[in-house]
Image (tube, rainbow, N blue to C red):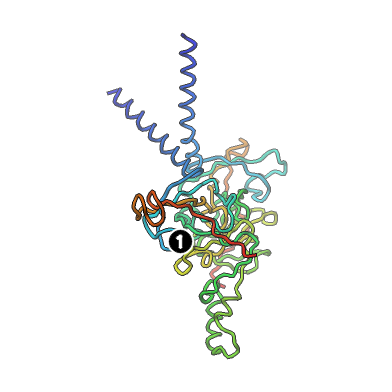
Amino acid sequence: MFTRHFQGHGWRWSLVALSWLPVVVTFNENVCHIAKIEGSSMRPTLNPNECSSSSDWVLLWKFNIRNAYNLNRDDVILFKCPTDPTKTYCKRIKGIQYDSIKTRYPYPREIVNIPRSHLWVEGDNVFHSVDSNDFGPISAGLAIGKVIKVIWPPSRWGTDVKSTTGRQQLITNQAD
Amino acid sequence: MQSLLQSWVKTATSALRVVCFVHIVHTYVYEFTETRGESMLPTLAARNDYVHALKTYRDGRGCKIGDCIVAAKPNDPNHRVCKRITGMPGDIILVDPSVGTNVFNSSSAMNTEATSDGDNDGYSEADEAFNSFIKVPQGHVWVTGDNLSHSLDSRTYNSLPMGLIKGKIVAANDFNEPFLGGSKGDFWGFRKIQNTYVNEQ
């Protein structure tokens, strides 16, 4: 009698836990999530050490991220790679909609005007980064989340993600 | 009082769980939703047409040329568009032979040049329109509406990154039709949305 009662209880509790799973997933998809940063393109802001075992984990803010006023210059964002939707890139926004941006070598034009709801993204580690200079401005619809804090490892707590911002003076008034 | 509060909390949390579950299903599995606009005529009616979209085709997974897709609009991500894929990565696309090439920045210069020449050298706007090709980059698709003359699509905003694709439309219900015996099919004009691609080779 007692064991049967207990089993019924366990079954019930696992069902309740399962029913909360969609809530957790929805929260992680739309409000807040964590992500691991891989690669060196955002050095020295993220992953400052050469050693690959010390990847940074960051807190992402996702709520209402696709609205233009939530994505500002010098924000660090995660977005789906436009050339391969299965990959996720982490870069810094260097230009928002209607900006004119001075580009770097692989880009075919010297100055580019960013279209509506598009972003110009670049890595802080300018010469080790596949970014908008390769694939052009990205649609804000590809943005996944904004990096607001480094949460792991503990030695990196309190890192200011805007302390260094990569290439400077990209915005120009000159239209092409 | 205590039990009233408890029942309220219980109702609220249940509602939250149900809403989130439905949201997850709508994002990853299946959605039944209304479409509006003339751009997909005659495949989809301009209003009151509801489509069955499979979200497992998210991010362009398994999408083929000729498929009907729902995607976020690149220059306005909060809106969704419904288009047909007419070019896959690596395909070379003739942008739009039907009108002058106002797709490109250089078009106005080209057009004025052509008209001022009075077409004496046989160089006309139409020739220019027939000569603007574009290669669809990796991870992008070329999308157009079925109603080419009334559609805002890749001809204006260029190729669409697959990351913006939300799902594939597999069927539709037209609620302008009667329940039975409508011209499009029974059950409020239920019909499958087919892949229209014909390989001419």
Residue most toward the front?
A: B181
Residue A93: name its quadrant.
Answer: bottom right
Q: Is B59 or B196 nearer to us in this picture?
A: B196
- Percent across and percent down for residue B187 are 38, 48
> Which quadrant: the C terminus of chain B?
bottom right
Q: For residue A140, say whether it is visible.
A: no
- How many residues crowd around disc 1 within 10 Å: few (fewer than 14), some, or many (20 or more)? many
- Percent across and percent down for residue B121 are 60, 89
Q: Secondary structure at mark 1?
A: helix
Question: Mark 1 — residue?
Answer: B40
Residue B65: name its quadrant.
Answer: bottom right
Count the numbered circles shown.
Answer: 1
Q: Is B157 or B40 nearer to us in this picture?
A: B40
> Which quadrant: the N terminus of chain B?
top left
Q: For residue A48, say whether it is visible.
A: yes
Q: Residue at x 64, y 63 (%)?
A: B91
Looking at the image, residue B15 lies above or below residue A144: above
Looking at the image, residue A43 lies above or below residue B16: below
- Percent across and percent down for residue B69 are 51, 55
- Percent across and percent down for residue B153 are 50, 64
